[in-house]
């Protein structure tokens, strides 16, 4: 079983023991799920750079995910189905999507069940980390994965970050938004380029190299830093800046696919002895993603990740809400899963579940091709 340990660190009653109709109270558990997956398994072969991951004594690749689990205190009263909330940048989404709950601005806020719809219907709700660059902020649900390496050395390669200032600033991190950074290999890299344009499809203007540097500013002091970029005079509000540089160190972000697949399989199939707190009570798993995580689930389907190492179906249904026709950097060397920059990785063919033909390139295919081939 790829979930090697399911560690529960806290267990309380949801909303101080609120009753949800005939189902009764719900337990609120949280902890860490530890995984070890077989890099030689056919089910994992499409995870980019898994062959470059460090392995434990039995040849497995280890990683871990935060989780939060809401389940009927009497599991026999549940309806046998788990809703997996594929959390958006570490934030819970399914309760405001289905239960009309308030959307908290503070990730440490207590969970609100809203109108209690999912609970009154007896669903188990799982929130599981899948995104490897979620920052270590209390309340956010993240994933810890190893870096790829060759002969013990970090990988290096060209990456692009896009910035658009909505407040005055002269410094941005080498990351998407507030996420973990992709540091540069060399703070003095002469081949690095910073460009600016006014429209997503506009012609970029190259900014002279001596006008910007890989440094940070603290208390008006400039210090060398391979994790930040500083532009003299500041970034103009609303303009689109793109930084292309050589990064050093690549997290194996595609292990996020294995995390959501294997947590569903664990909850459905694992025994009491294997640490499953709901062994024998769950028959189905439905995954729900919003926007970024809707795109993640679309790529999960396209990559053909829904069959686990034991050749079993993991998820029984997927709701990819407002994901559009896009995917993302969810299984890519130097990938930044938060990124949704137009005209690059998110907007690659195919766009639909069923087969279509790209009249420009002549390509044919659909998101479900691999899953259809798997039966």
Image (cartoon, rainbow, N blue to C red):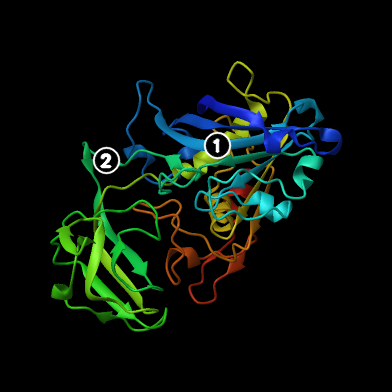
The answer to which quarter of the image holds residue 96 is: bottom right
Vertical position of residue 312 compared to residue 242: above or below? above
Q: Quadrant of the C terminus?
A: top right
Query: Considering the image in quadrants, where does the N terminus appear?
Result: top right
Name the spot of residue 117 as percent of width and height, x first. 78, 47
Q: Residue at x 30, y 59 (%)?
A: 174
Compared with 247, 265 (above or below) is: above
Asked whether disc 1 touches disc 2, contact meaning CB atoms under 8 Å apart, the reply is no
Residue 54 seen in the figure:
yes
In this picture, residue 159 sits left or right of residue 360: left
Return the disc, 1 or 2, that comes first in the chain's sequence.
1
Q: Residue at x 60, y 15 (%)?
A: 273
Determine which quarter of the picture holds residue 207. Answer: bottom left
Secondary structure at badge 2 equals strand
- Which residue is the extreme one toward the right? 22
Cα gap from disc 1 to disc 2, whole angstroms: 28 Å
Q: Name the residue under label 2.
A: 149
Q: Nearer the viewer, residue 87 or 154?
A: 87
Q: Is 344 above or below relative to 224?
A: below
Residue 375 in sight from this viewpoint:
no
10 Å crowding of disc 1: few (<14), some (14-19), many (20+) = many
Instruction: Estimate the x, y position of residue 213 in percent, counting from the top left.
Output: 18, 66
Q: Residue 185 carries which label?
A: none
Q: Nearer the viewer, mark 1 or mark 2?
A: 1
How packed is label 2: few (under 14 Cα within 10 Å), some, or many (20 or more)? some
Relative to 337, say whether 154 is above or below: above
x then y, percent, for residue 261: 57, 39
Residue 45 image position (x, y, % from top left): 45, 41
In this rendering, the count of numbered labels is 2
Q: Extreme front residue here?
A: 219
Left or right, 299 with reference to 53: right
Residue annotated with mark 1: 67
């Amino acid at each position: 079983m790829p979930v090697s340990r399911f560690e529960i660190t806290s267990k309380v009653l949801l909303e101080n023991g609120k009753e949800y109709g005939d189902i009764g109270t719900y337990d609120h558990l949280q902890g860490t799920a530890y995984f070890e997956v077989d890099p030689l398994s056919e089910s994992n072969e499409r995870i980019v750079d898994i062959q470059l991951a460090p392995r434990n004594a039995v040849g497995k690749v280890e990683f871990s995910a935060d989780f939060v689990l809401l389940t009927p205190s009497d599991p026999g009263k549940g309806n046998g189905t788990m809703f997996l909330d594929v959390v958006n940048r570490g934030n819970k989404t399914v309760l405001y999507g289905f239960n009309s709950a308030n959307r908290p601005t503070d990730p440490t806020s207590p969970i609100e069940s809203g109108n209690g719809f999912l609970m009154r219907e007896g669903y188990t709700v799982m929130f599981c980390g899948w995104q490897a660059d979620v920052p270590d902020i209390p309340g956010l649900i993240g994933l810890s994965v190893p870096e790829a390496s060759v002969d013990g050395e970090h990988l290096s390669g060209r990456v692009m970050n896009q910035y658009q200032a909505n407040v005055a600033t002269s410094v941005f991190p080498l990351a998407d938004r507030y996420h973990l950074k992709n540091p540069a290999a060399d703070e003095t890299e002469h081949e690095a380029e910073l460009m600016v344009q006014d429209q997503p499809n506009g012609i970029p203007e190259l900014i002279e190299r001596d006008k910007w540097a890989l440094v940070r500013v603290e208390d008006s002091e400039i210090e060398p830093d391979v994790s930040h970029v500083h532009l003299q005079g500041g970034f103009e509000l609303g303009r689109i800046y793109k930084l292309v540089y050589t990064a050093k160190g690549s997290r194996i972000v595609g292990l996020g696919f294995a995390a959501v697949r294997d947590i569903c399989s664990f909850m459905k199939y694992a025994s009491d002895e294997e640490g499953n707190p709901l062994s024998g009570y769950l028959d189905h798993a439905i995954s729900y993603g919003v926007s970024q995580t809707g795109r993640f689930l679309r790529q999960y389907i396209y990559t053909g990740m829904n069959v686990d190492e034991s050749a079993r179906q993991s998820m029984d249904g997927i709701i990819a809400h407002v994901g559009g026709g896009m995917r993302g950097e969810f299984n890519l060397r130097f990938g930044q899963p938060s990124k949704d920059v137009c005209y690059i990785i998110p907007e690659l063919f195919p766009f639909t579940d069923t087969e279509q033909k790209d009249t420009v390139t002549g390509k044919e295919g659909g998101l479900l091709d691999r899953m259809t081939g798997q039966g």
